[in-house]
Amino acid sequence: MRLCPWMQLNKNSKKSFYRFDMNNIYPWQKSDWARLQELRKRPPHGLLFKGSKGIGKFDLAMNFAQSLLCQHPDETGFACGQCPSCHWFSQGSHPDFCLLQPDALSQDGEEGDDSKSASGKKPSKQISVDQVRGLADFSGMSAHQGGRRVVVIHPAEAMNTNAANALLKSLEEPSPGLLFILVSHKPQQLLPTILSRCLSFVLPAPDAESAARWLAEQGVKNPAEALAASGFAPLQAAQLDEQLGSEERDKLLRAVRQPAALDVFALAEALQKTEQVVVVQWLQQWSYDLSAMKLAGKLRYHPSEEAAIRKLVEPVAPLNLARLQSYLQGAKREAQHTLNPKLFLESLLFSYRQLMLH
């Protein structure tokens, strides 16, 4: 059976294909899984998983895809993990399954990873029209086992305009037994015509208690702080745990508490081996809390710093805090292409100090 071109590329990628323990969906997804079982009887041609980033939408989509293709799912709809279909799925070679996602995700890199491929080029963060057009052969084939075929597109908003228009034709003229599962963090960026042809399946963020309990089970030292720093996205919180306890982040937070005493050159020297994008993100979270405290008396990312932040923002004009947030948005884009990390960090820290003191 001929594989889709991107399936060949992604065959060994943990990001693209990996074996799921079907009893291991996230605790906050149990009710979502039960809702999905109702769709097994008469699944739509297009299904849109939408919700905030970092809550497990992609994992749930892959679980559902494997369960639909499984020859012997159990009474709760979970895949058996033992049949030939499950074996093919875990190996990334299932003839009735295709995964479309950007090369930046397909090469074992996180979304937004700027590492270069073997060709020396940065992997694309878009799903190309050629990838979508490659579905034509897959769509026209009969199911290997005479059952369903599944395509997962993740994240759906990564499709460029041409790719989205190419997909629209497949959604308008669906092949029998073919299900498209679109996973989206930003459904507002999808074409209205695509939205209208998919059944919307909203995945809510977990409550803080459930997410913190799960993080503690994963060995996260400070679940509440990790959740706050991630914007209450538990999967991102798990990845942030190392950063939260990093010496570099602690140095930055100690320094920005006292802008007047901030030694720009020394701090830039200490941070220059840290990814510039990460440093900007730390400052963005700090800036958000400065504005939140000034305007509403609340914090999101640094609950343990309430006293220090309250004192810090008291003399700062709200307009300067707004300017700081706007500046950091531009700095984040620049950080992805900077040639001189130390010079970039010096400029970043000088701007922070100036806006906080004037």
Image (cartoon, rainbow, N blue to C red):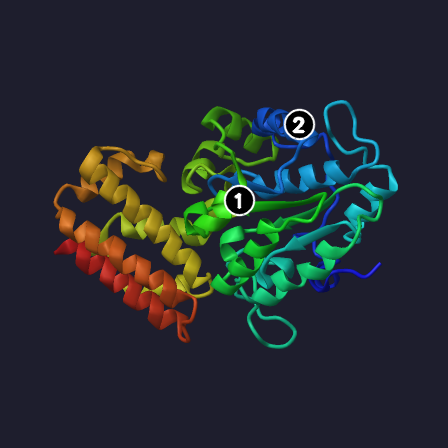
Left or right, residue 349 beside residue 154: left
Q: What's the residue type where badge 1 is placed?
A: Arg
Residue located 49% across and 34% down the image: 222
Which residue is at the front of the view, 41 or 261?
A: 41
Residue 237, visible in the rendered structure: yes
Image position, residue 124 (x, y; %)? 55, 66
Residue bearing the label numbered 2 = 37
- Tag shown at residue 84: none
Which residue is at the front of the view, 70 or 354?
A: 70
> Disc 1 versus disc 2: distance between alpha carbons?
20 Å
Image position, residue 217 (x, y; %)? 61, 30
Left or right, residue 310 beside residue 216: left
Which residue extends farthest front?
173
Looking at the rendered image, the quarter that the C terminus falls into is: bottom left
Label 1 crowd bin: few (<14), some (14–19), many (20+), radius 10 Å: some
SS type, badge 1: loop
Residue 245, visible in the rendered structure: no
Task: Tell me how many marks there are.
Answer: 2
Label 2 near label 1: C-beta < 8 Å?
no
Left or right, residue 162 beside residue 7: left
- Tag shown at residue 197: 1
Q: What's the residue type where badge 2 is placed?
A: Gln
